Image: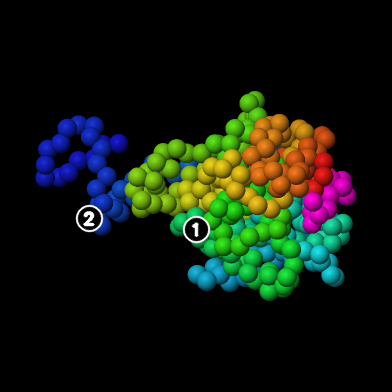
Amino acid sequence: MEMRKRRTAVPNMRIFFIFPNSWWMFIHLLIACLLFTCKNNGDDRTPFSFDSIKASKTRSPEFLKTSDGTNLAFYSFVPDSPSGFMLFFHGGGAHSTAGYQALANSIRHRMNIAVYLMDLRGHGRSGGPRGFVSHRARIYKDIDEMLLFLMGRHPKTPMILAGHSSGAGLALNYTSHGSFSLDYFLFLAPELGYKSGTARKERNSFAEAHTAVFILNAISGRRVCNACDAVTFKYPRQIRQQDPLLLDGISPEMAHALTPEQPEIQFSSIRRPILILVGEDDEMIDPASLRKYMNSLDDEIRSQSTLRVVPEATHLSILEGHSWIEKINLLSPATD
């Protein structure tokens, strides 16, 4: 990309990003977004099968208005006298009704835990531009406000933070940036990011990161391409047609919120028990690679935590095969 000042001669191929003048700012923003916004119109090549996700009866959401006026959608699965409550985050580009409600219902009935599925802002039926957040700190603030609201519903009740895939990555990031201490963590098929070393060597990527967008956004101090798709998702066309709430992509700051910054260090800082569940046949994650994260836990916390590999389960079917629920009490020290 070649840019020249009007009034001074400059060498060819020299790149200028000049921000003091508002017109220059507008032009650079427009050009960058036109060049580097990456839209995914549906790719039938996907690393895993969606056949394991069965349709379930969808209930109506409730809404929490945040401090900036955005309505966050959430779905409640509450037993009569819950022994604790769980806030659960969906995976990348998804939403709470994309295969998670049957799992929440099972946890409610079999574990006597109140489960709340939360659509992140810009996802599902929550408000906000699709896939966008201006700064990752706003996502952590949303979680703070949702937890505070739920603590009002369930005072003096143990709190569990949970997530599937990159939703588990968000839960891990919250341990570094959130305001509240949790009592337990549940990570299902956790996607811990490109720094984690947990990806299967032979896997086909489901999410494609667009490096140019991240670079432009970073060097401009989020003034360029903050609303561009920095990560796009390979949901098959048929799945997109069936579920129009699935996202094409997410913005740079949303991607940062979902991607653990220093996963091993973050694990070592956790002071509450963790349960990690990953499918033996997970197409994305190498189950053995997660062992080092368990080993990074404090000795006492590690003795109360569990890494369980679920036989024959895949990245998505782990949401449907709930036999593991019968063997686990989330509010007691874990055993393996």
Residue 254: in magenta span: no
Image quarter in which the C terminus is found: top right
Point out residue 173 in the picture as x, y percentages from the top left corner. Answer: 57, 51
Q: Is residue 261 above or below residue 178?
A: above
User: Which residue corresponds to the image point at 17% horizontal and 44% vertical from the top-left?
Assistant: 5
Q: What secondary structure is found at the residue carrying circle 1?
A: helix
The answer to whether residue 117 is seen in the rendering is no
Real-space CA distance between mark 1 and mark 2, rounded to the nearest whole angstrom: 28 Å
**Closer to the camera in the image, 278 or 184:** 184
In the shown orientation, is residue 94 left or right of residue 2?
Answer: right
92 left or right, relative to 277: left
Amino acid type at circle 2 is Asn
Hey, which quadrant is residue 110 in on the image?
Answer: bottom right
**Residue 106 percent across, percent down from the top left:** 84, 55
Compared across the picture, whether 28 is left or right of 108 comes to left
* Disc 1 versus disc 2: nearer the observer: 1
Q: Is residue 326 magenta?
A: yes
Q: Residues within 10 Å of mark 2 (few under 14, many from 20)?
A: few
Residue placed furthest toward the front = 300
Kind of residue sitting beneath label 1 = Ala
Q: Percent x, y for residue 200? A: 65, 29
Seen at 79% across and 57% down, the residue is 331
In the figure, residue 182 lies in which quadrant?
bottom right
Which label sits on residue 137? Answer: 1
* Residue linked to disc 2: 21
Magenta residue span:
323-333
